[in-house]
Image (tube, rainbow, N blue to C red):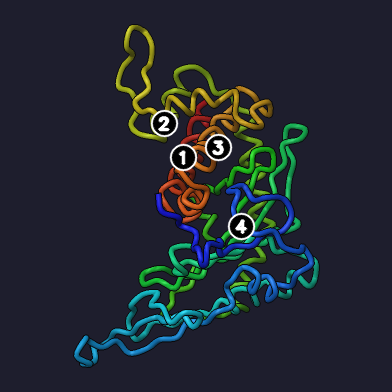
Amino acid sequence: MAHELEMINGEAQMAYVGDVPWHGLGTKVDRELTPDQFQKVAGLDWTVEKQPLVTATGIPIKNKEALIRSSDNSVLDVVGTGWNPVQNSEAFEFFHDYVMAGDMEMHTAGSLKDGQMVWALAKTKESFELFKGDQTDNYFLFTNPHQFGKSINIRMTPIRVVCNNTLTLSLSQDTDKMVTVNHRKAFDPAMVKEQMGIAKEKMEQYKSMAAFLGGKRATGDNVIQYFNEVFGAPAKEKEDGVLPFTSRNAKIAMENLTTQPGANFAEGSWWQAFNSVTYMTDHLQGREGDSRLQSAWYGRNRKVKLNALDKALEYAEAA
């Protein structure tokens, strides 16, 4: 499988501080780096410019422009004339005041899809512990896409420490999507920072939600049907008195239920069942760590986790 993480001269365009990230990729750097220094080490100190698009014979193409990367003059994508690029430096500058004040620290940064998707992840001071040792830390993920049809996105991303599973907030509440900025609008850091003020409140909501799942028992056929619904379709009827699995992934999730890292926390609960899903999506599915990262943050597995949380809450409420 081709790497999603951008590789230049054999090196992954990603940097991290502290322990190796859950996806196992990147180059370790000094924890004391400022955001702009972090940007350079991650290989993201390039700019994007728009240039008129022309045919092979030199005829201008109306209302179309090419996004050109300064470091190698490569074409990242083709966009409309009203599309406004946001430079990588603006993404890292966004974190500057928080990092300098000690409210956040840079964690990872890199690029996917040959530079089309640039991200920076910073750890906040908000965290919580449940079930005597099950800790969840909070991060902010800033995604700056240089790609037509994609918007700038800043969202809260909880990570469960014991297993490094990236968790998610409820799909029905849509609270994981903190701020989205269309490239046809000017990027306003002040407006985005105002929205980030609700992060602490959202983390408290998530803590209550996790505690609720951990206090509700997940038993028998309900667990099997839950995994069936998350990874495929519910079983219609029992076979020889046993509810069957409707997909291979559902069966694997059940097998991992009591063996996944952190399985001893809230055993037999919907919190345990939900984390069996996140363990699969973040650590077992996909051949490469970077493809798992792409899917967990932006692709199919992010939707799987959103759906898994909503369904776990439904089952827990009925328990």
Residue beneath the point at 44% across and 18% down:
221
Residue beneath the point at 67% across and 66% down:
197
**Whole-number angstrom distance, CA of label 3 to CA of label 2:** 12 Å
Amino acid on which the number 2 mark rests in the picture = Asn
Evaluate if marks 2 and 4 touch, with contact meaning CB atoms under 8 Å apart: no
Label 2 crowd (10 A; few <14 / some 14-19 / many >=20):
some
**Whole-number angstrom distance, CA of label 2 to CA of label 1:** 9 Å
Q: Which residue is mark 2?
A: 249
**Left or right of 104: which side holds 290?**
left
**Whole-number angstrom distance, CA of label 2 to CA of label 4:** 29 Å
Evaluate if marks 2 and 1 touch, with contact meaning CB atoms under 8 Å apart: yes
Amino acid on which the number 1 mark rests in the picture = Gln
Q: Which residue is mark 3?
A: 279
What percent of the width, then of the height, locates residue 161? Answer: 69, 43
What percent of the width, then of the height, locates residue 281? Answer: 49, 41
Q: Which residue is mark 4?
A: 26
Which secondary structure lies at badge 2? Answer: helix
Residue beneath the point at 29% across and 86% down:
53
Q: How many marks?
A: 4
Among numbered discs 2 and 4, the one appearing first in the sequence: 4
**Left or right of 137: which side holds 2?**
left
Could you say which quadrant of the image residue 128 lies in? top right
